[in-house]
Structure formats: C-alpha cells, structure tokens
Image (cartoon, rainbow, N blue to C red):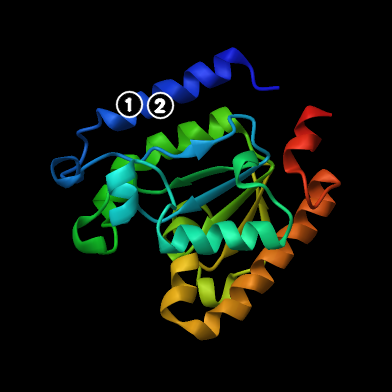
Amino acid sequence: MASSNGKQALEQVHTDVHSCRLCPLCRSRTKAVPGEGAVDARIMFVGEAPGSDEDRQGRPFVGAAGRVLTDQLKKVGIDRRQVFITNVVKCRPEGNRDPEAAEIEACRDHLLTQIAIINPKVICTLGRFAARTLIDNGISISREHGKARRISGILYLPIYHPAAALHQARLIDSLESDFRKLRSVLEEELGTATSPQAASDA
C-alpha cells in the first residue's frame, strides 16, 4: 500500500510542476503535465514531452501515441492504472518540436524527485530523450532498445517511443519486441508478468 506521506510528496511535486516557471515553456503551455499513476508503482514509463492532446488535458500519453502505449501494455498483461507514466519535460514544446537541453535540465529535478518518491523496480525509457536523460547521454536507441541495464538498484529498459511506430510502421515489430522484453524483465524482477502492483503489495 502507498503511504500517505508518499502520496502527499508526489502531490507536492505535481503542484510544483503546475506552478513551475523555470523555462519559457511555461508561457506557451495550456496545462502542465506532471504525470499520473500509482505512487507505489513498481514500473515507471518516462517519455519525451507532452503533445497537443496532453497539453489540453494535462495528462500524459492520451493522444495517438498513448493509445499505442496502452495497447502494448494490454498485450503483455499490464494494467495502465498500475504503472506511473510521465515525461522528461512536463510542458509541451511549441509545435511538438524536440525538447531543448535547457528545458530538459529545468525539469530534471521534478523527474528525479518523482523517481525517488515512487522508487520503482523498473523504469522504461520511451525514446532517445528519456534514455539519454536517465541512462546514458550517448546512448543510441536503435542499438540499445530492449537491452536492460541496472543503475543504482533500478533496472532501466530503453524502448522505442510509441510515436516512432506511428511514423515508421517498420518499427512496430521492434516496439512489440521491446514490450515482450519488458514482460520477461517483470517475470525476473517481480515474479509476475501480469500484475506488477501485486508484487508490491505482497
């Protein structure tokens, strides 16, 4: 069960994100998108930045890429409500451009605090920006996707961003392979492929 202190701490991070003025994206956003999910989630997904749908709703991965993510989770038996989903950058870059280094740096403490509070067993980085922020600044997602590595007690699994499969149909097989790898990682780390939350409640 999640502690009340953990919930309060995460809520404070999200309050800080909504009021954040650390980079110019605060001036163009409709809504900040701190993330959502279980505070005691054993698995965390970190993407790049909110898109237009996310900016309107204030929720992560609710557009086309979000539907791909949800579909892939279902295929490997994971309930989206049992994980935590966020992005490296919490506000939408104009025109859905790539986030800039200064914007990523401005949001870094928000992300690292979320990770510290949730303390997941597995973090899936979605796409190159999340992988380079959390795993290795020089990582190549095309070479390293699906290859897990442990850092400070957390198992990181870089995988393709769901949006990549929307733009390049040839990547859907790689994305599905990455999620099958995630299922095997969960079996090894948590003793389950279908209920990561159950392992935390045991």
Q: Quadrant of the C terminus?
A: top right
Q: Which residue is drawn at 53% across and 86% down?
A: 170
- Horizontal relation, residue 63 to residue 106: left or right: right
Mark 2: give few (<14), some (14-19) or many (20+) Cα within 10 Å. Answer: some
In this view, the residue farthest toward the top is 4
> How many numbered circles does the render carry?
2
- Horizontal relation, residue 29 to residue 16: left or right: left
Q: Which amino acid does label 2 sit on?
A: Val
Q: Quadrant of the N terminus?
A: top right
Mark 1: give few (<14), some (14-19) or many (20+) Cα within 10 Å. Answer: few
Name the disc covering residue 125, or none: none
189 in relation to 18, above or below: below
Labels 1 and 2 touching (C-beta < 8 A): yes
Name the disc covering residue 13, or none: 2
Can you see residue 45? yes
Can you see residue 138? no
Percent x, y of residue 37: 55, 37
Q: What residue type is labelled 1?
A: Asp
In this view, the residue farthest toward the bottom is 170
- Horizontal relation, residue 36 to residue 196: left or right: left
Percent x, y of residue 92: 27, 51
Give how far apart the Cα atoms at labels 1 and 2 are: 5 Å
Name the disc covering residue 16, or none: 1
Q: Which residue is drawn at 57% across and 65% down?
A: 159
Quarter of the figure with residue 176: bottom right
Q: What element carries label 1?
A: helix
Percent x, y of residue 180: 73, 66
Q: Which residue is drawn at 76% across and 32% down?
A: 200
| Nearer to me, 138 or 78 | 78
| Nearer to me, 94 or 130 | 94
Q: What element carries label 2?
A: helix
Percent x, y of residue 82: 65, 40
